[in-house]
Amino acid sequence: MPKLAIFYGSTTCYTEMVAEKLLALLSADPRFSRFELSQHNIKHTPLTAMAEFDVLLLGISTWDFGELQEDWEAKWQDIGDVNLDGKVVAIFGLGDQLGYSDWFVDAVGMLDHAISHNQLQRIGYWSTEGYDFTASKATTDDGQWFVGLALDEANQYEQTDQRISDWCDQIADELSAIGV
């Protein structure tokens, strides 16, 4: 049975709440019944544990002026030691597109870059349509996509649940398309 894990860091519980919503949706969705599902707070779990899973959903928030969430920051030097070769990875992140418009979900892009040395399959890219920000390290070169799900609990909290649900559907479709 393939293993799918959600790894996240959370300071104010928002990223943790998103991780819990993701796990609840995946657990209730028959398309994910073929997976052994789990959730891991990186504050209490070494990053090297990611190597034990086939599919990873990585959650990170952006703080202040494009800074990493504290649990990710504390382990950032270890991320290069994590072997994600052959894994399927999707990233989700939280940020504030109005208060920190120049750094919206930058940590998502930083995490994507930090794991890019691995031979992995990326899924879960998310359209930038519907967001209002100046700059982000988390967008593709053409600016049309985030490299993961972008959530803004400060300014668009009313859209969070629908975005999470839509992203779960997208993840299911993408996993099916690549035969996982």
Image: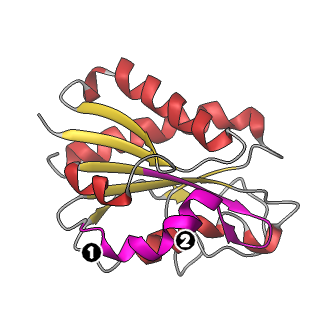
Q: Position of residue 134 (x, y in %)?
A: 79, 73
Is 64 one of the magenta-colored residues?
yes
Visible residue check, residue 145: no
Image quarter (top left, top right, bottom left or bottom right) of the N terminus: top left
Helix, strand, or loop for circle 1? Answer: loop
- Looking at this view, is 21 or 69 the one in front? 69
Image quarter (top left, top right, bottom left or bottom right) of the C terminus: top left
Looking at the picture, does residue 131 appear above or below residue 13? Answer: below
Count of numbered labels shown in the rendering: 2
Picture quarter containing residue 68? Answer: bottom right
Picture quarter containing residue 96? Answer: bottom right
Instruction: Describe residue 6's horizontal placement relative to residue 18 as left or right.
Output: left
Can you identify the residue that label 2 sits on? 109
Q: Position of residue 88 (x, y in %)?
A: 27, 56
The structure residue drawn at horizontal position 25% and vertical position 65%, both measured from the top left corner, is: 84
Looking at the picture, does residue 13 appear above or below residue 7? Answer: above
Is 71 one of the magenta-colored residues?
yes
The structure residue drawn at horizontal position 28% and vertical position 41%, both measured from the top left corner, is: 4
Instruction: Describe residue 56's horizontal placement relative to residue 1 as left or right.
Output: right
Visible residue check, residue 110: yes
Looking at the picture, does residue 84 appear above or below residue 26? Answer: below
Q: Position of residue 94 (x, y in %)?
A: 66, 52
The residue stretch that appears in magenta: 58-83
The structure residue drawn at horizontal position 59% and vertical position 54%, both measured from the top left corner, is: 93
Q: Earlier in the sequence, mark 1 or mark 2?
A: 2
Give the amino acid type for the residue marked by disc 2 in the picture: Gly
Can you identify the residue that label 1 sits on? 118
Q: Residue furthest left?
A: 1
Looking at the picture, does residue 174 appear above or below residue 160? Answer: below
- Looking at this view, is 32 or 145 the one in front? 32
Q: Which mark is residue 27?
A: none
